[in-house]
Amino acid sequence: MILNEDKKIEDLIIDAYNEKIWLPEFQRPFVWDKNQIRLLIDSLYQNYTISSILTWKGNDELSRRRVGGGIADIKVPLHNSEEQITYLLDGQQRTTALTYIFTNKHIYKSKNKNPAPPLNLYYDSEYTGDEAEKRWLFDDEVIYDNDNSEHSFKIKELLKKKELHIKFGIRFIKVKHLMIDNLENEFSLEDDNQKYKFLFEYGKIVNTLKDKILKRKVVDIEQRGNLNSVLEVFERINTKNTKLSIFDIMVAKSYKKFDEGYFDLRTYLKIITSEESSVKNNYFENIKNIKDIEKYKNPFLDELLLFLIMMILKKEFKATFIIKISTDDLMNNIKNIHFILKRTLEILNNNFHIEYDKINDYKPIAKFIVAFLARYDNDTNYGRFLNNCLWNTLLYNRYPGAQNERIEKDFKRINRHIFNLEIALMEMKADNSRNFDSIINSTAENKQLFNCFYHIGKGSTRNQLYKSILLLFKHNNLKDFYTGEKPSINGTKITKLEQHHIFPLNSLKGKEIINKYKNSEYHNIINNIANISLITKETNNSRISNKNPSIYIKEFEDEHYKKGNIKEFYKIMENHFIDEEILRFLKEDKFEEFIVARTKLIYQQIIKLTTINY
């Protein structure tokens, strides 16, 4: 980096006014208020530090706008442009504030389409109070007369009446006058002698303020390196302690103009996650062919999707590689990226019953699937291995904490044992952070259960293991206890399978259980996942309600027997991890025996799903 210590505040303002420095489009908009601007000017006046600015001179590679510019000022780089641009990476709020207060340049705040009203700041040369920043006054502020505390005025109003300088002489100095060489045309004083004297005294104060403010040196640090290294630095710059979004950075970096039109990352993400069966490797052709593309909703969070794209293109596991992706990388790999993401969504939905609106709750397995599909053919053996890995991840919490590093470690194991994936899986399972082996020896007297429970109440959350075992339930081809209906993702509240207690909370037996265990280590045992299954709301409310299992199970069994489909009923119950022995426990309201036996059956399914069996 080079430090340019000869640059002055005046030079910075002139560069901004003449549009010689530009803001990358991922910079947040100008948001400073009047008081922040006032404090900046007073800090300069009092020789306080206002920190440095950071610039980078590079090619026309980023969509950008002028300092203080609005939406209409955005410049889009041409594809393969070689124009040299100076970008302001850090210091835009200060630079925009200075441009706003010292010039008449139109300034846009936040994302407003219209420019902010002009700001006119004045220096009170006679201020002697303790609050130094109050020597700086905006023309629309109420000012109280020093000689008469009951009398107030506004500089703006006195200027309209042409009374400001008649009443107060050279007391109030307009800050914008510091950037004007010839002040003679700024005042309407009829008497030449009076005008000369006024301008002389007024000019002396202006020159003093220039020396104190505009001649102050500003440290301009020039960032060296290519665009990717600059973006790595920029990503670490905090604005009010808020980390800048890699997605916003990539939107600006990838935005390019081609002969056919503009490349826009947001539209691109909709193309590669679309449900279209055939996506072409031509970005602009896809825009024409895909109907209602703007209505498409990306099922992945933007930053997660960028990470997945990076894993496909760069075969890396570190988020820092995202900024190394170029527009050409994206344009040349549309079809392959779409195929892998579409296959990933199918696996998450079909193999694991993860609905699209819940996908972002399962980031580690989405990353693993994408990394796997980007490297290996999806043949039968690989497919089984992938499912085993993912069930291990879900049920044994394989990736707590540093997900990306752990996933990378697993892929090194896979590469080492690509011809014997069972060994790779054994090495991977050695890192599992959960162990359920104690469940094997569980008894009604010495219960060993899954540490996950149903939580009642709006907005309640359930732990990761609870959600994973629910996926395991869905994987077991569950049907409703009574109607035999299958799960329906888009079903109504009546037909969609929901979580309900097998021993109902408000049944006589349920109340007995709650009372029995309320002061023990198993005080929440009735909400354990082993007492939960998925049935329709209609069956729960109309058929089960607050009945003990001994009542409603017998009713269900009798009805199915009369209909001649009793074997189907037993099969449905088996899929709910309720075999004949457990069914007997239910018909006898034996809760302890039931919950231990069902826990063991669920554990047997976990072992089956997490072990390779060629």
Image (spheres, helix red, strand yellow):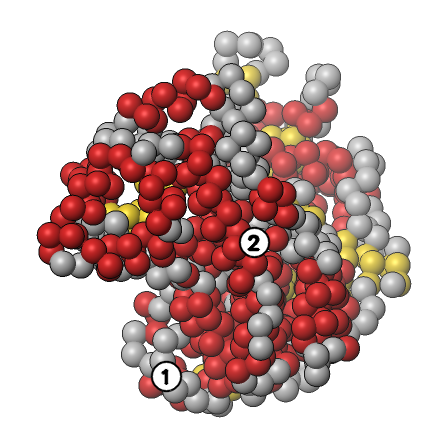
Label 1 environment density (alpha carbons within 10 Å; few <14, some 14–19, many ≥20): few
| Percent x, y of residue 383 | 54, 77
Q: Is residue 273 left or right of residue 393?
A: left
Confirm or deny contact between disc 1 and disc 2 (CB under 8 A).
no
Instruction: Tell me the residue at 88%/59% (across/down).
Output: 3
| Percent x, y of residue 347 | 46, 70
In the displayed structure, 11 sits above or below 461; it is below
In the displayed structure, 286 sits above or below 206; it is below
| Percent x, y of residue 583 | 33, 44
In the displayed structure, 121 sits above or below 359; it is above
Which quadrant holds the C terminus? bottom right
Between 184 and 5, which is closer to the camera in this rendering? 5
In the displayed structure, 503 sits above or below 18; it is above
Circle 1 SS class:
loop
Q: Amino acid at mark 1?
A: Ser
Which quadrant holds the N terminus? bottom right
Instruction: Tell me the residue at 81%/57% (across/down).
Output: 220
Q: Is residue 503 left or right of residue 520?
A: left
Task: Give the residue at mark 2.
Answer: 395
Q: Amino acid at mark 2?
A: Leu
Task: Give the residue at mark 1.
Answer: 277
Instruction: Tell me the residue at 49%/24% (across/down).
Output: 523
Between 496 and 94, which is closer to the camera in this rendering? 496
